[in-house]
Image: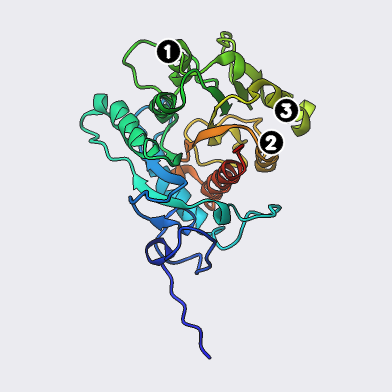
Amino acid sequence: MTVKKHGDFAITRDSLYGTTNEPTYAGVTSFMRRKYTRDLEGVDLVVTGVPLDTATTNRPGTRFGPRSIRAGSSMISWMRPYGTDVDPFDKLAVVDYGDCFFDFGYPEAVPEAIEEHATHIISQGPGLLTLGGDHFIAWPLLKAHAKKHGKPLSLLHFDAHSDTWEDEEGRIDHGTMFWHAAKEGLVDPAQSVQIGLRTTNDDTLGFNIFDGPFVHREGVETVVAETRKILGDNPVYLSFDIDCLDPSYAPGTGTPVCGGLTTNQAIQILRGLIGINLIGMDLVEVAPAYDVGDITSLAGATLAMEFINMYANRPE
């Protein structure tokens, strides 16, 4: 008997659960082949994109990040993450909502558009995983999550840069969002952690920092143990700038800095943090124009899948 199969599960799948197998080189490139829909009934987690790169200080191009991460995810969408006992998609109903819409001709209106987009989604119940876009998007995303979960939140921040440089009100910059977030009380620096930093900023604002040299010197287990102590049971927003990885692992980004984490170190830290009270996530700064063999997009998709695994195993 011939079993009839079909592709394009992003639009043809019947169930929001489970992992499906179709050719990695073809089909609609929703994230991990999840159903492409804006119907949130019964949905546990939404993946969305914010294709913004007008806040970059160096090389632009992260507006193409959400699309490239989705394409990269097709290469790993046919199986559950290696080393996991249970497929996260067997536990969570996950959909791809598509991208946040904003009019690039009115840049001053973009932050509010992002916040409203996120608020519309999470106010209906699902969690949110956002694909950037430059890192500025984390600020309006934090505003939306703080409205739902209360403030201050704990920030778990992976990056080569602190993104806490002093700023002026009204500026749109991908290096100052967490200065604003701390000053506005959206996050509590004393109960937040920054991992992988390797650029100079003498004013830490009180954030707990495990910089790149610390990770390499002390190892993953120490970073995980210390981070868990700091975060405790607090609601945690996870923001991962792909330039936390060394440029040899993620060349496709706007502000690469040598001496960063390996992809494996990042994955092992994330796995060690399973069980934290994760309430929202973003993966940002993938700029495919500077990529080599799509390794940055693949790294971004792989890390985003680790976020989903963390979300699937958060405390009840």
Instruction: Name the front one of labels 1 and 2.
Output: 1
Location of residue 12 (image quadrant): bottom left
Seen at 56% across and 13% down, the residue is: 201
Q: Position of residue 274 (x, y in %)?
A: 66, 38
Q: Is residue 264 above or below residue 210?
A: below
Seen at 72% across and 30% down, the residue is: 224
Say what amino acid the circle numbered 3 marks: Val
Callout 1: SS = loop
Q: Check whether the beta carbons of the residues at disc 1 and disc 2 lie within 8 A of each other.
A: no
Nearer the N terminus, badge 2 or badge 3? 3
Q: Residue furthest front?
A: 316
Q: Is residue 217 above or below residue 182?
A: below
Nearer the N terminus, badge 1 or badge 3? 1
Going by the image, does 137 lie left or right of 218? left
- Quadrant where the C terminus lies? top right
Q: Is residue 33 visible?
A: yes
Callout 3: SS = helix
Spatial CA span between label 1 and label 2: 29 Å
Q: Check whether the beta carbons of the residues at disc 2 and disc 3 lie within 8 A of each other.
A: yes
Q: Residues within 10 Å of mark 1 (few under 14, many from 20)?
A: few
Q: Position of residue 128 (x, y in %)?
A: 45, 39
Q: Who is closer to the viewer here, 190 or 157?
A: 190
Spatial CA span between label 1 and label 3: 28 Å
Instruction: Name the front one of labels 1 and 3.
Output: 1
Going by the image, does 195 lie left or right of 161? right
| Residue bearing the label numbered 3 | 223
Q: Who is closer to the viewer here, 288 or 50?
A: 50
Q: Position of residue 53 (x, y in %)?
A: 37, 34
| Residue bearing the label numbered 2 | 269
Q: Which mark is residue 14?
A: none
What colouring does the structure picture have?
rainbow
| Residue bearing the label numbered 1 | 184
